Amino acid sequence: MRRICWGLCLAFALPASAVADEFDQGLATLWEVLWHQSGTPTRVVRWENDLRVRIGGVNAAAHREHVLKALREVTYEAGIKLVDVTGAPDAEQTANLSVEITPDGQLEDMQPCVTYLDFRTETRIDRATVQMRDKDAWRCAYHEAMHVMGVRGHPAGQTVLSYFPWKIDGLLPLDRVMLRAWYSNRMAAGMTPFEALPVLADELVATSADKPAAARARDQFFGSVIQKMHAYANGQGDVPAVVKRSGKSTPDGIRFGRGEMSYFLGIAYLEGVTVPRDATQAVKWLERAANLGNRSAQTKLGGFK
């Protein structure tokens, strides 16, 4: 099965707004990164083996070291081994990551680079392909390297994944938080957003100078997110604003996302992640998801009978 993780796009103008507390902004960024730009919340996908990269295409030699530097940084934070097999005779067969530098006219101006993640189930990444235009490879390398690791969202916060660039030639602190959490022992492939959010948030709390205050802000944020997602799943709320600003959200994506979110809420209440355990709420949301055609919810409800 192939899932597309869209690459760096040119930004729309960011509306002026009051500057929120830096930690709260970080929490919002970690939540937004769990959303696909189509308007759908996503599960955690990640590598479970070494990365073997092959770099080729137009003017590849000029970009090779910068691309490798970006990949080395993300894999280092994740604790994943990176092997450059570009020069190997069997590189095409052994590589599970291909980076192609394309002619400048091959990709669209609004999408100068893109990453495709291949996985049979929404858990383990089997292969990945990156395409970057020659003239944009420098600014795309770190952005796409984050996508390669399975982090698919485009949050508005201070991360190389943002459509509103803060930095393009190196990782920012939030990027490192994401990668450490994404590949930590607490995180598991296939986790729902509500299962993943506490792992991401706790990694951010660990970086705070005032950990008790950060923990309180984390818990308040969880409550706010749950309330908003109740409304969203019920068709009354909306996807995070950054998803809509991406220009890639679709009515079908949002409609599908409401069903997915109903299932994710059911699992959250069933397992007691992000929210207190509540069997009644779990069944309510799973039934809603099942009625919307969510097969995972239908299977999960079958276990209650």
Image (cartoon, rainbow, N blue to C red):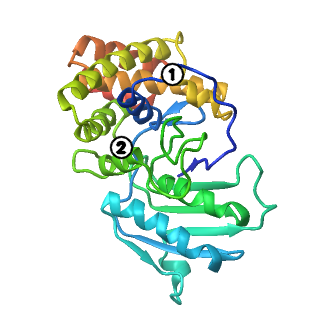
Q: Is residue 67 left or right of residue 82?
A: right
Q: Position of residue 181 (x, y in %)?
A: 30, 46
First in sequence, mark 2 or 1: give its number.
2
Numbered tag placed on residue 97 in the rendering? none
Q: Residues within 10 Å of mark 2 (few under 14, many from 20)?
A: some
Q: Position of residue 96 (x, y in %)?
A: 48, 69
> Where is 273 relative to 220, above or below?
below
Front-most of residues 163 and 121: 163
Q: Position of residue 119 (x, y in %)?
A: 47, 54
Numbered tag placed on residue 258 in the rendering? 1
Mark 2–mark 1 contact, CB under 8 Å?
no
Secondary element under disc 1, as helix, strand or loop, is: helix
**Quadrant of residue 169 within the rendered picture:** bottom right
Three-letter amino acid code at the position of disc 2: Gly
**Quadrant of residue 39 within the rendered picture:** top right
Residue under the image location 44 percent in, 36 percent down: 34
Q: Is residue 178 left or right of residue 239?
A: left
Front-most of residues 58 and 11: 11
Q: Is residue 204 left or right of residue 298?
A: left
**Considering the image in quadrants, where does the C terminus appear?**
top left
Q: Real-space Cα distance between discs 2 and 1? A: 18 Å
Farthest residue toward the right? 105
Three-letter amino acid code at the position of disc 1: Arg
Secondary element under disc 2, as helix, strand or loop, is: loop
Q: Which residue does the numbered mark 2 point to in the structure image? A: 190
Front-most of residues 237 and 295: 237
Residue under the image location 43 percent in, 49 percent down: 172
Residue under the image location 39 percent in, 49 percent down: 123
